[in-house]
Image: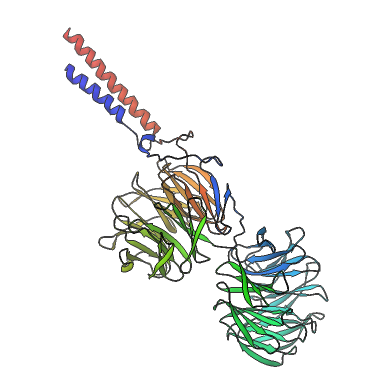
Amino acid sequence: MNTEHTVSVFILIFLFIGSYSAPGSISTIHQPAYVQNTKMSANNTSETIDLINDSVISGNFMDTGNAIVPTSGAYASDCGCYFVANYFTDNVYVINATTYRIANVMPVGSGPISVMYVESNGLVYVANQNSGDISVINTHLMSVIDTIGVGSGPQSIAYDPQIDEVFIANSYSGSVTVISGSNSVVANISVAGASGVAYSQYNGYIYVSQYGHGMVSVINPLTLSTVGTFEAGSSPSSLAIDNLNGKVFIDNQGSDTITVTGPNGTYIRTIPVGSDPLQVMFCNYSDQVYTSNFDSDTVTAINAINFSSITNISVGLNPYGLFMGNGRNEIAVANEYTNNISFINTSTDEVYYSLTIGSGPQGLAYDPVNSYLYVTNAYSNFVYVLDKNYSVIAKVYVGWGPSGIAYDPYNNYVYVANYDTDNVSVLDTQTQTVLRNIAVGEGPAGIVVNPSNGYVYSINQLSDDVSVINPSNNSVISSIITGSSPFNGVYDQANGFIYVGNFGSNNISVINPDSESVVYTIQVGSGPQDLSYDPENGYIYVINFNSDSVSIINGKERVLSTINTGSGPEGICYDPYDNSLYVSNSGSNDVYVINATTEGVEAIIPVGIYPFRDCVDPANGLVFVANTNSGTVSIIEPMSPTAGTVISPHVQNDALFFILAILVCALAITGYIATIKHKK
């Protein structure tokens, strides 16, 4: 063996060893300067952003009192609190009437829709429409003390103080359930289409509106029998009584009117009101009648003496329930869509205060130029803008049901998919204002940005297509057909393709932006919706909601492997700081941290209620998780490379390489020595 060749091989081997760095090892990860937060250890929820109260809470905080779809409420004088039923979150929030702060959260049955307070016993009764029962809350203990099964679809509650009994109108089963003071069912009275129920102090009778029949039934509570019926308007939804003279005011949802009758059903007047009146109430202190107009977002005030309409009061979106407030001249309105409570002064018939109690955060986008976090709130139609200190600096009203959101580095704009209004809002990140609303396909759910040219892709779930938006003029230039029910997508930096998850057809549509066509279709798990791209290995990660898994796709357009997740995975993002995938599991209220190389689960982190989407701050690796049903954003610190975490998943391969390298070196040295001896 030539000596010069041997020495050259020896040098090359050591140079190769010195320069080698295995995939996934520390030297291949570009570590930004990062100061570890001392509040919590890495891979935990370090802080929680309470969007509604605009505050940051240390650690994981789930019950912030950010209700979803408030339907009704009641004021309890013995504790000075409002009890507000939240239909979608199956709970009741207790709000301090003085400070307007959330004091307690009480789980009840499914679909709470009506609330009534009985002062004589200090109990609050909650009608749970979907579970067919009544939750009984003790206001002194602040807890649910009983659950009473009633008819199907309980919708309205009335109390008879003469005999201490509660009457429940069951809309689905067409009946009225009577509950005694000891919280036991004493009777079920057949009333077809029962929707609203009210007690009259004037004659001691119970009045029941019959929604599908255009009638009102009158019940004698002493005999527990129907003693009469009379006509109302179209689709009477609720009713209220003037206890001084017994007049009955009936909301007619089908004809946008209120029918006024005497206590015996004698017709007096029909009063036009707003669109889709749902609940009516009589205010004894002002001699006025108020009705919530669900579709016109107003409350109509009516003079109960001359039956003239006084005014239409603008409130939140989709007002549903009305209830008396803390003072004699106060009425509270539960607004379903904007998740807030409007308080009306009955002396001036003006809204003097609005209490926001819900938001429904779903989508997140990070603006690296301003270090701002943008959060879509699907139930309040706002995008919250948070600065680097996580303070809400702006609330931008967009379209209805905003969900998907993305930042476009091409023009520094943020694009928001408004699911219910079929458009995309363009936000100027300097002024925090909407520049334009772009009409797209039906049910836009996700937004994908092509960073190479700034083109924006709106993933339209209901029309099964993708709208392509030119960022230069913010107009739709084409539409691409996808699979069934596309939910979201991701851009592949390696090949320039767009990957779209089709929830209904269980596959991925791979779109070539140049030809604006689907070039591949990849079958994955059940219910794919969110996707993420790992630039380190070029893989695409697909969340499969129905099969609780992640499918891994490589550049050759095939599934390499599948990783099990928690229950109901909704969102996924890749964090280059720790080479990990963060999966939001809506069913188990946690986030799985998955090593992108070993594909193993490294941590399971509790977050808020129903975590939906997540995103990463590339400057420090922080992960933000939108918790839809708790109205919060969880902040997760990434795995620290210096905290004893195994950084390289290829340790065994590294060891094998070095062993082989040493063997080669040994052979080279042996050959070199042998050559020298041979020459001697």
Determine whether 662 is above or below 634 in the image: above
User: Which of 597/93 is in front?
Assistant: 93
- State how the image is colored: rainbow
Determine whether 10 is above or below 181 in the image: above
Q: Is residue 213 visible?
A: no
Residue at left 57%, top 80%? 276
Q: Where is residue 410 in the image (x, y as percent from the top left)?
A: 32, 57
Q: Where is residue 389 in the image (x, y as percent from the top left)?
A: 50, 50
In the image, 660: left or right of 549?
A: left
User: Which of 230/92 is in front?
Assistant: 92
In the image, 241: left or right of 69?
A: right
**On the image, which quarter does residue 31 sit in?**
top left
User: Which of 268/571 is in front?
Assistant: 268
Residue at left 30%, top 22%? 663
Q: What quarter of the picture does the C terminus occupy?
A: top left
Q: What quarter of the picture does the N terminus occupy?
A: top left
Q: Position of residue 451 (x, y in %)?
A: 32, 55
Q: How many marks?
A: 0
Determine whether 663 is above or below 635 in the image: above
Determine whether 114 is above or below 190 in the image: above
In the image, 184: left or right of 19?
A: right
User: Which of 417/582 is in front?
Assistant: 417
Q: Where is residue 212 in the image (x, y as percent from the top left)?
A: 61, 83
Q: Is residue 473 visible?
A: yes
